[in-house]
Amino acid sequence: MTGSVGAPAERREGLEKVGGTARYAAEFHFPDRAQAWPVPATVARGRVTGVDTAAALAVPGVLTVLTHENAPRLSEPDDPTLALLQDPRVPHHGWFVALVVAETLEAARAGAAAVRVGYDAEEHDVALTVSHPGVHVPEEANGGHPAVREQGDADGAFGSSAARVDVAYRVPPLHNHPMEPHTSTARWEGGRLTVHTSSQGTGAVRAVLAGLFGLPKERIVVTAEHVGGGFGSKGTPRPDVVLAVMAARHTGRPVTVALPRRYLPAVVGHRAPTLHRLRLGADADGRLTSLVHEVTTHTSRIKEFVEQAAVPARVMYDTPHSRTVHRVAALDVPSPSWMRAPGEAPGMYALESAMDELATELGMDPIELRVRNEPDVEPDSGKPFSSRHLIECLREGSRRFGWDGRDPRPGTRRDGPLLLGTGVAAATYPVLVGPSTAAAHARPDGTFLVRINATDIGTGARTVLAQVGADALGVPLERVRIEVGSTELPSAPLAGGSSGTASWGWAVHEACARLARRLAEHAGPLPEQGLDARADTEGTADAESDFARHAFGAHFAEVAVDTVTGEVRVGRLLGVYAAGRILNARTARSQFVGGMTMGLGMALTEGSIMDAAFGDFTESDLASYHVPAHADVAEIEAHWVDEEDSRLNPMGSKGIGEIGVVGTAAAIGNAVHHATGVRFRELPLTPDRVL
Ligand code: MOS
């Protein structure tokens, strides 16, 4: 071991990024490149009756207008949101009904504004309520989780509990809004297709394009060298890549499609709204006797996507009786999809708020309540945990935050017009991993090259994988080069589900360890072509475990609520995590702090309104959908406990990309209750609600 892993190594591409030379998908300036601008539907349900393109084609620089009548035909996609310009139906407002291709971005935009679309509009229905007649229990929730799980007699036990909490919460639709909107540049050359795209995983993009355009995978190259964030919305191919390839095929020129920010909410997925009902029963000592978490959410007419928000309630607390239920209604809304910590983020907001309400009901410290309900095994599966250090996180957080001696009485601390309070909540996220391949190469000059189609979406994946490789090789970090972000490299899964580093790192570790063995056996100087080793973790990294594997954490928040304006300011956020071995102290801290910042947005400002008449989201840009800006974020601290877990992967790491956003909003909401004495059960906690 050379000790690279764990060190706070700086991002390898950091200088390129701050210097502006890192190339993103829109920045492939081929001399004859055209630009395209889509035209979104202005009805929420119906059919296109005609597209008048004459005025658009008359705009100087416009090359063509693609519609369902002239666009290249696609094979039927597995993902219905990619069946673009194939037929006249409009499944939701904002669905693309035309694409204008032009010499310049300005001409494409002017052309798109000049396209006249006729519709046969039908009545639409976008309003989710728990009693909506379309609400039903689906086959399963996302991630293959059963929609319903029951143990014992949850209702009976709840009815006879000494302490009870029966509450409803609402989390609104949320948008991913990565800094770089979804963008692709496509180029056809002699029956070969090259695509530069902003994606969390180019392997999936290539597979989908091969299917849609009937092309062997070998004739497609997809790269994602630098990606300006995704937060789940770039985990699967989006309309930009399909439209860019169509337009390039139709015009014979390279084409860039950079989706306008305001079109994203309707076409790249969103976190679906979730309506929660929680019933917690406990005995007088605070031991849970019953836990019921029921979630109602929406999906679109074309795709079933069921946010698995009751799943964390199957992991967290010991109770003899429980029921967790997912229900869904298909409405005329845009298709929801993955958003950072899908399931856990909204689910733990509700569960951890309800736990706080139960602590209040019992007159018990909320940390003590969680300690009393710590399970020996995973409550739902009965499996032992590979490691679980939730209590250590709560205790360490309590010490660092200064929780001891907290006066539990709500609404009693004042500073002029401000009411002050503190809150705590737990966090959890599953440990996911997938099979991957990687190649390692030793050069005669003593340097090494690691190649893997990992994607660095801004997390520092390149850097961390080089650290893993350097340690497996037993060489200093500077001697290891790394290539990621292209389907020309050994295949690897996407950056999603907080699984990237574990999945890729496993293969990188194996390839480099193998190469180290080959080098040890090699006598004399290396041949000019060097030495190579490869690894494929298929059959190893995806093996079903006998253990329940999850990361855990604790979030603490300090708030000031302005009684004059209703504004909530978070003065301090502190997180402590137990997430296995931390592979890079610098990039890990950024991941945790980034997740907590997203949780801060979820608590205070982020929320989208599905307008019933208009049939679409009202907030579609960063002016109306407010993500935290620097002025919103005061002090955020992230810490971790040393956790050794040999049942994960050769690095001993758990995922860290998503757990930061889990429970943060509950900690803030609980602090607002402590400050004001009022329970707000609907996010975000904007002044109009709080005042
Ligand atoms: Mo994450 S929502 O799995 O990219």
Image: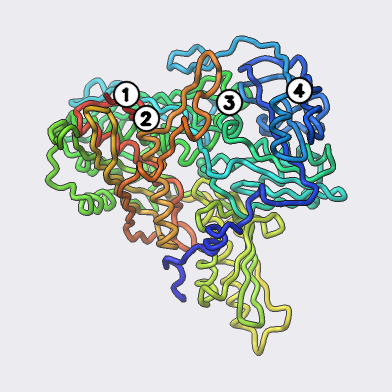
The crowding category of the residue bearing disc 3, from other C-alpha atoms within 10 Å (few below 14, some 14 to 19, many at least 20), is: many
The crowding category of the residue bearing disc 2, from other C-alpha atoms within 10 Å (few below 14, some 14 to 19, many at least 20), is: many
Asked if marks 4 and 1 touch (Cβ < 8 Å), the reply is: no
Q: Nearer the viewer, mark 4 or mark 1?
A: 1
Amino acid type, residue under disc 3 in the picture: Pro
Residue 144 rendering spot, x and y as whole percentages? 53, 36
Q: Which mark is residue 87?
A: 4
Q: Which mark is residue 689?
A: 1
The crowding category of the residue bearing disc 4, from other C-alpha atoms within 10 Å (few below 14, some 14 to 19, many at least 20), is: some
Amino acid type, residue under disc 2 in the picture: Pro
Q: CA distance from mark 3 to mark 4?
A: 17 Å
Q: CA distance from mark 2 to mark 4?
A: 38 Å
Residue 254 to residue 101: above or below: below
Q: Which mark is residue 334?
A: 3
Q: Kindly identify the residue that appears in the image at 51 percent across and 76 percent down.
A: 476
Residue behind mark 2: 684
Q: Kindly identify the residue that appears in the image at 67 percent across and 56 percent down.
A: 486
